[in-house]
Image (tube, helix red, strand yellow):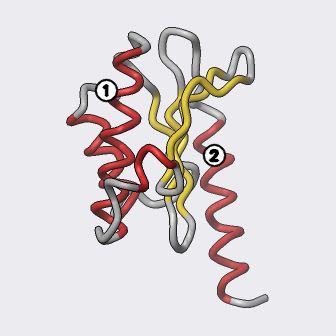
Amino acid sequence: MSQKNMREIARQKRKRRIRKRIFGTEQCPRLSVFRSAKHIYAQLVVDTTGSTILAASTLSPEIRGEIGGLKKGDAAKKVGEWIGRKAAEKDIRKVVFDRNGFLYHGRVKSLAEGARESGLQF
């Protein structure tokens, strides 16, 4: 197997191990993060109903104007701030952070810090 496949397999193992313990409810939804090579995606998910309350990414039209020439880490922070503001408008203060098997550094950490700065608690 190639090195890329081995990394993806390891991430999927971490994801399964983490998701055994993490569960989003109406009062405390799950903030799920996905990181690709170019973009970062975040969504608030209620696992009891299987629905997404709110979603944001670097591709979202509302955010895309703000992150025009920013680096990927700074863009991730903007996405976190935006999702935190929108969650506050829907009276959501507490979330469970799901890093989706990604290591907590770099863009994932920047998104989490941005969400915390805008008022989300996790």
10 Å crowding of disc 2: few (<14), some (14-19), many (20+): few
Who is closer to the viewer here, 67 or 33? 67
Q: Relative to 117, does residue 5 appear above or below in the rendering?
A: below
Residue type, mark 2 in image = Arg
Q: Residue furthest right?
A: 1
Residue 102 shows which numbered tag? none
Q: Relative to 114, does residue 3 appear above or below in the rendering?
A: below
Residue 120 shows which numbered tag? 1
Residue type, mark 1 in image = Leu
Who is closer to the viewer here, 19 or 98? 98
* Residue occupying image coordinates x 71% and y 68%: 9
- Residue 74 lies, in percent from the top left, at 28, 61
- Considering the numbered disc 1 on the image, is that residue within a helix, a strand or a loop? loop
- Considering the numbered disc 2 on the image, is that residue within a helix, a strand or a loop? helix
Who is closer to the viewer here, 38 or 109? 38
Distance from label 1 to label 2 (Cα)? 24 Å
Question: Which quarter of the rendering shows the N terminus?
Answer: bottom right
Q: Kindly indicate the quadrant of the structure image that contains residue 114.
A: top left
Q: Relative to 93, does residue 10 appear above or below in the rendering?
A: below
- Residue 12 lies, in percent from the top left, at 68, 58
Q: In the rendered image, which residue does mark 2 sit on? A: 17
- Residue 39 lies, in percent from the top left, at 51, 64
Q: Residue furthest left?
A: 117
Which sits earlier in the primary sequence, circle 1 or circle 2?
Answer: 2
Q: Kindly indicate the quadrant of the structure image that contains residue 44.
A: top right
* Residue occupying image coordinates x 35% and y 31%: 84
- Residue 40 lies, in percent from the top left, at 49, 57
10 Å crowding of disc 1: few (<14), some (14-19), many (20+): many
Q: Kindly indicate the quadrant of the structure image that contains residue 90.
A: top left
In the rendered view, does 39 fall on the left or right side of 91? right
Question: Which quarter of the rendering shows the C terminus?
Answer: top left
In the rendered view, does 99 fall on the left or right side of 16? left
